[in-house]
Image: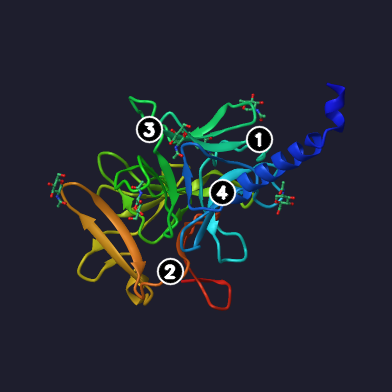
């Protein structure tokens, strides 16, 4: 066995393994995570058109890491979604995001699940399942690469940001809630939230109970909320309100159809902000 030490293989094999592991790291430069892959450390997914990135981030001087989605082309990292907001991990290199038993899960270095999509699946899931990051910033779990069936999507589980195309919904199944971060370095569930009410008006709530703001009723003719006439003056977004037997939701898109980064965010002070990225490389607030 000793002679092995001088064999050229003892040098080549580790280098080969190093290259292989580097390749696994770099080769994940795709928009998809399939059932045989996992994402950890500095690995990221990038949407096909290069608008959004998904990976681990550490806010400010925090000692914790989170899986999140941010804009690829906005220099100051702007997080639009957080998976494990209330269950941070301390070591992103030993933590993995992967598909297991029909769910997307995050396991920490001890293989303890810290976050899951929590879908109740009867089977153990299929090996063709795939999670895809779209150019709209939506991370969707599908049962196959070309499947039109979305099993779970981040747009249905917003954190503090509402992106164009996502639906703020209220129905029997669910009620979208946007909730502020706790502070600038802690994305965990904060005290301010925005919820659509069955009356189709929005309430901004403090600590999920005290109502301190309401938009008033939706005026479908003028496309404004009673208390938010500013909506009409905005030249950038189109707001669409859908209310039918199956669903009731509110969504928006840019009038110019461009992919210029735009977002609504429930900020730390309980203000709902409407922001658009300017060519001068900064966020403009309406
Ligand atoms: C994952 O691995 C299994 C077993 O090795 C294989 O059958 C399957 O095709 C792989 N799936 C993908 C998407 O590569
Ligand atoms: C991961 O990214 C950070 C920040 O860019 C860098 O300091 C660190 O060296 C990277 N780690 C590895 C293993 O690539
Ligand atoms: C994983 O999470 C469990 C439960 O919170 C914890 O006991 C364990 O120390 C964690 N492991 C690592 C490596 O962080
Ligand atoms: C998915 O669709 C693309 C484009 O339509 C096609 O090239 C690819 O072969 C399809 N893949 C599977 C697994 O059906
Ligand atoms: C928020 O409400 C809960 C009860 O629902 C209460 O226990 C908690 O103290 C409240 N938080 C603050 C900051 O008032
Ligand atoms: C509501 O859902 C049913 C069943 O999927 C469908 O047939 C019907 O067209 C839907 N109604 C609307 C207004 O979309």
Q: Which mark is residue 28?
A: 4
Frontmost of labels 3 and 2 is: 3
Q: Earlier in the sequence, mark 3 or mark 1?
A: 1
Q: Earlier in the sequence, mark 4 or mark 1?
A: 4
Q: Which mark is residue 94?
A: 1
Query: Disc 4 versus disc 1: distance between alpha carbons?
Result: 17 Å
Q: Are marks 2 and 1 in contact (CB under 8 Å)?
A: no
| Circle 2 residue | 259
Instruction: Classify mark 4: residues with Cα within 10 Å, few (<14), some (14-19) or many (20+).
Output: some
Q: Which mark is residue 126?
A: 3
Residue at the image point whose x is 41% and y is 59% from the top: 136
Instruction: Classify mark 3: residues with Cα within 10 Å, few (<14), some (14-19) or many (20+).
Output: some
Ligand 3 within 8 Å of the CB at mark 1: yes
The picture places residue 82, in percent across and down from the top left corner, at 52, 46
The picture places residue 144, in percent across and down from the top left corner, at 36, 42
Query: Disc 4 versus disc 3: distance between alpha carbons?
Result: 21 Å
In the foreground, 13 or 78: 13
Instruction: Classify mark 1: residues with Cα within 10 Å, few (<14), some (14-19) or many (20+).
Output: some
Label 1 SS: loop
């Amino acid at each position: 066995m000793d002679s092995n030490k001088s064999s050229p293989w003892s040098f080549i094999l580790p280098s080969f393994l190093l290259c292989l592991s580097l390749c696994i790291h770099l080769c994940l430069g795709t928009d998809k995570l399939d059932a045989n892959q996992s994402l950890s450390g500095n690995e990221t997914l990038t949407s096909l058109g290069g608008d959004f990135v998904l990976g681990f981030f550490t806010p400010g001087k925090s000692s914790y890491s989170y899986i999140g989605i941010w804009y690829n082309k906005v220099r100051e990292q702007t997080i639009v979604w957080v998976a494990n907001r209330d269950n941070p991990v301390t070591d992103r290199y030993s933590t993995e995001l992967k598909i297991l038993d029909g769910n997307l899960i995050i396991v920490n270095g001890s293989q303890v699940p810290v976050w899951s999509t929590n879908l109740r699946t009867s089977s153990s899931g299929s090996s063709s399942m795939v999670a895809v990051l779209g150019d709209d910033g939506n991370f969707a779990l599908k049962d196959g690469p070309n499947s039109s069936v979305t099993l779970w999507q981040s747009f249905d589980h917003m954190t503090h940001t509402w992106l164009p195309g996502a639906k703020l919904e209220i129905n029997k199944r669910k009620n979208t809630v946007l909730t502020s971060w706790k502070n600038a370095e802690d994305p965990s569930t904060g005290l301010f939230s925005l919820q659509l009410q069955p009356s189709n008006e929005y309430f901004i709530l403090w600590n999920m109970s005290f109502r301190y703001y309401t938009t008033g009723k939706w005026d479908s003719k003028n496309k404004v909320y009673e208390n938010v006439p500013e909506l009409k003056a905005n030249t950038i977004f189109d707001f669409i309100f859908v209310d039918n037997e199956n669903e009731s939701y509110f969504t928006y898109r840019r009038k110019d159809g461009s992919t210029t980064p735009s977002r609504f965010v429930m900020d730390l002070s309980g203000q709902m902000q409407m922001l658009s990225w300017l060519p001068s490389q900064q966020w403009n607030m309406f």
